[in-house]
Amino acid sequence: MVLGVPRPIVVAPMAGGPSTTELAMAAGTAGAVGFLAAGYKTPDAVAREVAELRTSRLPYGLNIFVPSSPPADLAPLREYRRALEPEAQRYGVDLPQLRLDDDDNFTAKVEIAAAAAVPLVSFTFGMPEASAVQALRSAGCAVLVTVTDVEEARRAAAAGADALIAQAGSAGGHSATTSPAGYDGSSTTPELVRDVVAAVGLPVVAAGGTGTAADVRRALAAGAVAVQAGTAFLLADEAGTRPAQRQAMLSGRFTETVVTRAFTGQPARALRNRFTDAWSASAPVGYPAVHHLTAPIRAAAAERGDPDALNLWSGTAHRDVRPGPVAEILSRLDG
Ligand SMILES: Cc1cc2nc3c(=O)[nH]c(=O)nc-3n(C[C@H](O)[C@H](O)[C@H](O)COP(=O)(O)O)c2cc1C
């Protein structure tokens, strides 16, 4: 199997805090595999984390964001910026000017992965160039590409991926979709896995809506070689999930999830809160411009411990999430 670990479970990369080296190592120690999340981090920080995992000799992976191109028409972004002014006032912050670049240091991160021969490298937010995939494979890395439909699966296979992560609409956090305007987040994991397996002859890791051992069994029965779960590990002792998100998840106040572009301009599944109710209908496509735009509001809300303007990323299985050590959460999923 492409993952080379006894348990068919991947602890998902979760950029923005939850993914820590402790989380990835605890997953590896318990017979699963954990991913580091390179998103939003400097190359130096990524290199340090990779070195730590490498020294541990545990299996692990590194996830990298593929840069997105800016939208052709900037008018909807300017309009959204104007509309968000009252939010900025409410939280006592200034909205930054529009920033369209997506310099998440893609090339440097790919080079770090290749130089360290990271065992598993996954991509999200789009298709890496075939040259990047080849460079990683030549360095001894297995390359996984996150896809959300059959067409993306075919493109990832053509780019030379070793395996695919089939991410259904039930998944927490950003969707990897390359068609963010039309994305409705309605696909379910077993269905998507069956379609992708039938279309492309590559191993498929299922992602989305995993809360129980029955969810894992259903994904494997549909043809997946493993399941990548994120939300289930947000309350893990080893996760770096921000206190405001932990409290929100434990509060019982947030009972539904929605797919929204309101926080970042890319569809993402989050707990429904005041901000998603107010802005999901008008938020334009445009990652990372919207991510930069809302960053001060989200930071101020986090500081105040106000969950109503936070991006509380969560999948549809959020009700099954329990705190505890990773090893215990894995035993529940793999029972
Ligand atoms: C808080 C959070 C952050 C995430 N960040 C990333 C990321 O940096 N890279 C990535 O490929 N996927 C990311 N994801 C998506 C996961 O890889 C995975 O697709 C998802 O968690 C699976 O659905 P589930 O949350 O219902 O288990 C994130 C998910 C969550 C919940």
Image: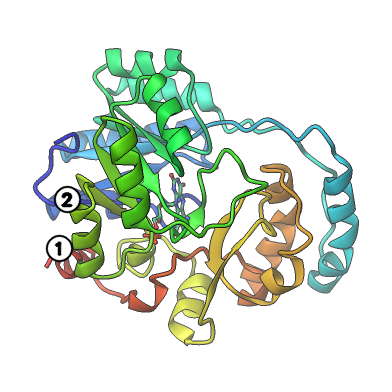
The x, y position of residue 141, in whole percent, is: 27, 24
Image side of residue 293 versus residue 59, left or right:
right
Q: Residue at x 17, y 50 (%)?
A: 8
- Kindly identify the residue that appears in the image at 45 percent across and 56 percent down: 187
| Mark 2 lies on residue | 8
Is residue 163 toward the left or the right of residue 131 in the image?
left
| Picture quarter with the C terminus | bottom left
Quarter the N terminus occupies: top left
Question: Mark 2 is on which residue type?
Answer: Pro
Q: Amino acid at mark 1?
A: Asp
- Between 163 and 289, the residue placed more toward the observer is 163
Is there a contact, CB below 8 Å, between mark 2 and mark 1? yes
Does the image show residue 64? no
Is 98 rendered above or below residue 139?
Answer: below
Up/down of 112 relative to 275, above or below: above
Mark 2: give few (<14), some (14-19) or many (20+) Cα within 10 Å: many
